[in-house]
Image (cartoon, rainbow, N blue to C red):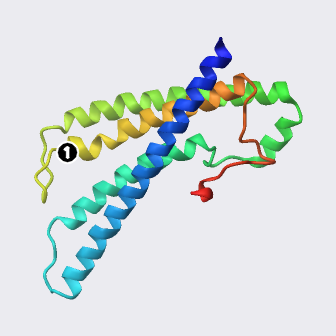
Amino acid sequence: MFNSFVSLYNKFIGYLNILLKWLIILLLFVLTVVVLMQVFFRYVMFASLPWSEEVSRYLQIWLVMIAAAYGFSYGEHIEVKFFKEKLQEKPLLYKVITSLIYILLLLVLYIFVTYSFDFASRVEFQRTPALRISMLWPTLALPVGGFLMILQVLKLLLNVITGRDEYKVAGKDESLTDF
């Protein structure tokens, strides 16, 4: 029963990652277009766009948060591989320590999401200088990205618990470079 739930959850995260990958590509494309437009208007037309810096800044915030969540799913964040290699020689110790790390990470991410959502709701009535949109939209990237990271770390934790830790140090199947 639990293994079927983990399989279903892994499938859900797989579909979520496809969506996140395309969202990252879209955000990066729009960011590139906005920056190139600003360069063109500033240096060719000699008339700077007043909104481009603000749009690119907010797109970067969303891009970083979504890409960080996507990276979590593939274990692409900073780690000390020496210790991970040594721990994999002792499977039970590896499972316990890795599970504790993921549980601690879930706790930190929960605190991050809680406080960032509180922050986003506090700045809801402030307006951005150039676009005049609510500051809720740029700051909402923090709790949304944090929630997506929680989903990804939960997948990693479930995989460690059930012995499906597919992103071990040796023989890593997938990478972000396989985009």
> What is the x, y in percent for residue 105?
56, 31
State whether residue 63 appears in this view. yes
Residue pictured at 45% horizontal, 36% vertical: 148
Residue 105 visible within the image? no
* Position of residue 104 in the picture relative to residue 133 (left or right): right
Type of amino acid under label 1: Met
What residue sits right under mark 1 in the picture?
135
What residue is rendered at 80% in x and 48% in y?
Answer: 171
**How far across and down, in percent of the image, does residue 98 sit?**
71, 31
Residue 1, placed above or below residue 128 = above
Residue drawn at point x = 36 percent, y = 41 percent? 142
Name the one closer to the observer, 107 or 52: 52
Quarter the N terminus occupies: top right
Crowd band around label 1 with a 10 angstrom C-alpha radius: few (<14), some (14–19), many (20+): some
Q: Is 34 drawn above or below residue 165 in the view shown?
A: below
Q: Quadrant of the C terminus?
A: bottom right
List the single residue furthest toward the top: 1
Residue 88 lies, with reference to residue 177, above or below; the image says: above
Secondary-structure class at tag 1? loop
User: Residue 6 in the image: x percent, y percent?
Assistant: 62, 22
- Residue 79 is left or right of residue 127, and the answer is right
Count of numbered circles on the image: 1
Q: Quadrant of residue 31?
A: bottom left
| Frontmost residue, 110 versus 148 | 148
